[in-house]
Image (spheres, rainbow, N blue to C red):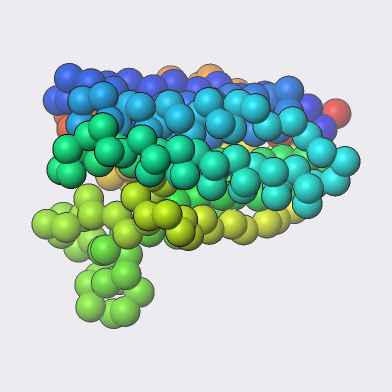
Amino acid sequence: MNISSYGATHVGMVRELNEDAVLCRDDIGLWVVADGMGGHEAGDMASGVIMSSLARLEPADTFANTLSRAQSLIHEANRDLIQDSHRFARHRKPGSTVVALLVQDGCGAALWAGDSRLYRYRAGQLTQLTRDHSHVQDLVESGLLSSENAESHPMANVITRAVGIDLLLELATCEFEVLPGDRFALCSDGLSRTVSDPEIGQAMSNIESREVIEQLLPMALERGAPDNVSIISVTCHAT
């Protein structure tokens, strides 16, 4: 199985600074989106620390060991950010969401904290493989808020987990089989809060990863993109 990807990040139409970061490592089967927070210097530093840490990942002898190493590197970034947080004012504490896709020998895993997402497109069906760590998602799952009203809720941007905030990071992980023909999309909430899931699924019906980005990014920008927008499209080609 050959895997190719294409990634892009954009400051959006309102923000002055891009605090998002993306990492595409087709050579080792690793793709990452991080959405920094904390304002000038803090947010982009936080997402950058995550990328610098995961860029050191090397495949191990088994998928389980590679996954364990990736988890350790994210926890290491979390500790580094907390140790450095004293340089910033309390209201500018550096933190970042993260979503990572790891693929090796037909095995896949998602690792995430926050509301950046991983989608899979398989046989014409779009599936969100991650669960948002957010206040509104908790309300939806408890039956206190409908999914239709979640995006317009005044606390829609409040996340409940992130890298760099708590010493004990709750990093979520799910594992799955990767099949030839599978397509994945990783994105920050700058895309998912502007473009609907059906629209994402329609774009992912394109075979080429670059075409997915060239359809989704302009769509978000045309709708005002109030936040930074980051997307990575990953395509698993049958050999």
Which residue appears farthest toward the left when viewing the image?
Answer: 154
Which residue appears farthest toward the bottom when viewing the image?
Answer: 143
Closer to the camera in the image, 138 or 200: 138
Residue 223 appears in the figure? no
Q: Residue at x 42, y 54 (%)?
A: 167
Quarter the N terminus occupies: top right
Q: Residue at x 33, y 26 (%)?
A: 44
Q: Is residue 216 left or right of residue 147?
A: right
Q: Residue at x 47, y 44 (%)?
A: 79
Closer to the camera in the image, 212 or 32: 32
Above or below for 141 versus 84: below
Q: Position of residue 24 (x, y in %)?
A: 58, 25
Q: Is residue 148 left or right of residue 141?
A: left
Quarter of the figure with residue 182: top right
Closer to the camera in the image, 206 or 151: 151
Q: Is residue 66 left or right of residue 183?
A: right
- Give the total number of marks visible in the rendering: 0
Above or below for 89 versus 147: above
Quarter the C terminus occupies: top right
Q: Position of residue 106 (x, y in %)?
A: 80, 44
Q: Position of residue 10 (x, y in %)?
A: 32, 21
Closer to the camera in the image, 131 or 84: 84
Residue 131 appears in the figure? yes
Quarter of the figure with residue 174: bottom right
Q: Is residue 221 left or right of residue 29?
A: left
Q: Position of residue 67 (x, y in %)?
A: 70, 47
Above or below for 39 versus 160: above
Q: Residue at x 26, y 24 (%)?
A: 41
